[in-house]
Image (spheres, coloured by chain):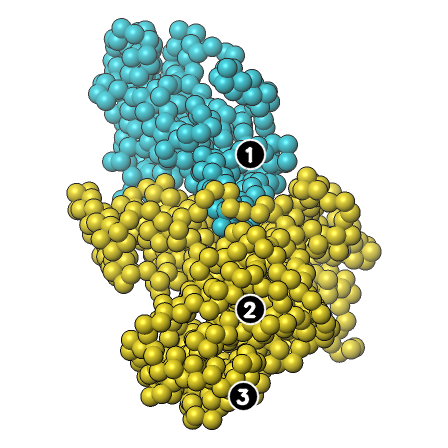
Chain colours: A cyan, B yellow
Amino acid sequence: MFASFKQKFRDWAFKRTAETGTVTLTQRRIFIIPTRQGFTLCFVLVLMLLGDINYNLSLGYVLTFLLTMMAVMSMLHAFRNLAHLEIRPGRAEPVFCGETAQFMLHFNNRSRLSRFQLCLVQTGASFWSTTPNPLAFDAPARQDTGVALSIPATRRGWLQTGRLTLYTEFPLGLFYAWSYLHFDTRCLVYPRPLDDAPLPLGDAPDGSGKRSVAGDEDFAGLRKYVAGDALPRVDWKAYARERGLQVKQFSTPVGEELWLDFSAAPDRTEEDKLARMTRWVLDAEARGLRYGLRLPDNELPCNYGIAHRDECLRRIALFNLPQDNP
Amino acid sequence: MNKFLTYGLLLSILMVIAPHADHLPLWVSSICVGLLSWRGYLAYSGNPLPKRWLLTLVTIACIAGIVISFRTLFGREVGVTLLMLLAALKLMELRQARDAMVLIYLCCFIIITNFFYSQSIPTALYLFASLMVILTTWVHLQAQNMALKPRLRVAAVLLLQAVPLMLILFVLFPRVQGPLWGLPQDAYSSSGLDDKMSPGSLSRLSLSDAVAFRVTYNDKVPRRDQMYWRGPVLWEYDGRTWTAGRTLYSVTPEFTGLDQAIDYTVTLEPHNKTWLFALDVPDKLSIPATLTQDFQILRKEPVNARIRYAARSNLVYRANPRESERQIRRALQLPRQFNPRAQQLAAEWRAASGDDAAIVNTALQYFNRQNFIYTLEPPLLGLNGIDEFMFTTRQGFCEHYASAFVFLMRAANVPARVVTGYLGGEFNDFGNYYIVRQSDAHAWAEVWLAGRGWVRVDPTGAIAPERVQRGLSAALSDNAILPFMARNPPQWMLNLRMNWDALANQWNQWVLGYDSERQFAFLTRLGMESLTWQKIALNMMLGVGLAIGLFALFMLRHLIARQPDKVQAAWLKLCRKLEKSGLPRAPHEGAQNYAARVAAVRPELEGNLLDLAARYSALRYGGKTNEQQEQEFIRRATKFSAFPRKRESG
């Protein structure tokens, strides 16, 4: 019976769909219930009151009533700790499968009141048992606090935070005030690249894939380092001169193209093939080749550069996934 | 567990067990302090907590200690001791947040146990100090990275907000006349008069400064030598100790010729005995009690909480002029085997006179003339105590005189008995009431004279009339061993003490003595009519609800009300000024672009305007805000003028 009640409550609380933009925690979005410790204190207070009555302890009444009222006021404090926070999602950088996606969330606290001990978790199994490691943070007064929520990426495609619970038990741990956050932000998860997969050089089906030997020689300039760049191409001398991480770029003669073909991957399953292709894209980009992507349902002409690489990875990540995934 | 959190818990426990140190055995305090310092050291050094078997051993040792020193595992003292040891031992296995919560609740409980021993004003202040420490620790437990200052602030806010709510609850919570269940034997301490008297018992009591009761006279105040507060009446003598014997409830006393009525109110401190005190002889009392045949007022239950009662007494009376044969016989009993010389003296008096009243006078004159000394430290007496006192030592306190006098009377065949109680009292200007202390304890005699009934005779008055007229300090030549208040301290100190006692009296009356009766009286005075406890409870809930609602409104108002962005307002004002000067801002234009455009046309504004625009952008979009910089910007933006005066022209 309790389970069905809980389900009903969830349905009611969850009826909102994912939201875009800034969410302000208004009164109607914040729920509050006593914690287990709150009930324990209630029991202790009843014991104390019985003692006061029995022994006619006036100061005992004072202490009991003080504690009771502090407990009650702590409910307001817990509520206020969440009230009127403005939350907007930030971006989440794509990650490879098996890594941890970092979803940025910005908590804007416009009030003059600092908020302490806010906890953020993915909405879990129960209200009572909080996940062992909630992300706890403070939101100081009149500041915008950025928080990165880590969610392990386990499958390629779009990763979403799902419904998040923002809760607090501050200041006394007697009340659990919470609110649900469901943003439509998503993080792209690329397949986990195979550890070792040589590029399909020379055996491209149309014979146009050639080794770009000359490409490594024509130095074309420097650009900023982007995650995924091959380490040998980093201009370490420039780095030593404190100019930041820079990558040497080489021009690759037009015409030397490498096609990365889904059907050329020697693996059996689709996922393995995609994993291999991910590795190919990374390696091809690292070696400065011009490469194109050929998937059963679409094709990307040959090009090079980070934008091209990311587009290739994106297509691989989203290959053959249901379209209704937002 | 955070090191500083452990220190906070240590301090909390230390604060709540410290007041218990003066009434628990020394070994309990030492073990607690030992365990606390051990835990403190472990937290400081980061060493692991002791093994479980070691703790079990310590626990068993503690329980064994309790059994050995208290000889029981039940009762109040044992309960308090157990709680304290439990708290100290729990600290030794502090591993999770839940353990810390248990400790915090334990601390609150230990605070309550302290109220068994004291509920004075300092105790109340100490309660707030302890609560503050506990709350700060409690908040720390929830937010372990929080600095001390904001934690203190949160705790103080919680405590201060709870105070008015607590007052509402305190006034309106329906009071039940306890106890709800039987209390252990040692639940109440007893001090004060006993129902027996032996040499030394009253002089010991005279050394105590403690308040026995306080009296407010409604209009007329009796003379000091009429302020005899009757306590237990002692009938039976075994040669050394006077005891009350069997009290007759069934027979009501008979008073005639009553005159000089005095109305007064007594606030009696708990003494754990059934008798109440009244001036001789009472004829009206506001609370249910029985007037025994020997004019004592007895309650059914021992007085184990402070009580108030109004009474009326008549200073002129004739009491039991027709006393029953049995009582007369009781008032003549004597152990004949002791004190032969005193008996012989009494027999001589009897032979000389047939009139009982004349014998009484003879005895008083005898005491007056034979160089008796009134002292708090009389020599010890042997088997024939009264003989030794009458003929050898001749030094004694009121119990010696009362005892010897009644013995002589009985030996001379005059019915007599010993009455104990209090004499006099000390006037408090500030509160307009009299304080009667234990040091005012006194013993006197009553003789029964045919036709006049029981007549009070105070043999002490024959030796040291100052005692009756001016109090103990006046009567004793050497007052060094008297309690502080019975001596004659300097006036300012006396004033201070009287002020303090007046305050304590108000505290006792209104805070500690706030029972159902007081509650009804107070609420009626506030204007509530036809009170029932249901009505009070309803009012309480309404009051608390309303107060919490007000708090909620106050606390959430500034969160809800959008604060107009002062920075933006200042900037817009500046833009309006420029607009008036013919340079309106285009809707798409950002602050810095606009400023640059204006500066190109009006170079004299350039420096100031560009700087302001840069500051504005930083404040609005820079993320972190800085109060000081905001103020600076607002000040300068408001002062900004589109037509700055040239220095030459101004």
Q: Please, what secondary structure does the residue beneath circle 1 have?
A: strand
Image side of residue B313 versus residue A234, left or right? right
In the drawing, what numbered circle is on residue B230? 2
As measured in the structure, the alpha-carbon distance from the residue carrying label 2 to the one carrying label 1 is 62 Å
Evaluate whether residue B273 shows in this view.
Answer: yes
Q: CA distance from mark 1 to mark 3?
A: 72 Å
Mark 3 and mark 2: Cα distance apart in space: 20 Å
Which chain letter matches label 1?
A: A
Q: Is residue A62 above or below residue B423?
A: above
Residue that mark 3 sits on = B466
User: What amino acid does circle 3 point to?
Assistant: Glu
Mark 1 and mark 3, same subunit?
no
Residue at (74%, 43%) from the top-left corner? B587
Which of the pair A75/B126 is nearer the observer? B126
Q: Which residue is mark 1?
A: A32
Q: Chain of mark 2?
A: B
Give me the residue at 64% from left, 36% from top. A27
In this rendering, would B106 be left or right of A23? left
> Dot 2, crowdedness within 10 Å: few (<14), some or many (≥20)?
many
Q: Look at the numbered disc 3 and give the secondary structure of its residue.
A: helix
Q: What kind of residue is marked 2?
A: Arg
SS at badge 2? strand
- Within-10-Å neighbours for mark 3: few <14, some 14–19, many 20+: some
Q: Residue at 78% across / 47% down in the picture?
A: B529
Q: Tell me where residue B81 appears, x and y as whole percent.
A: 32, 53
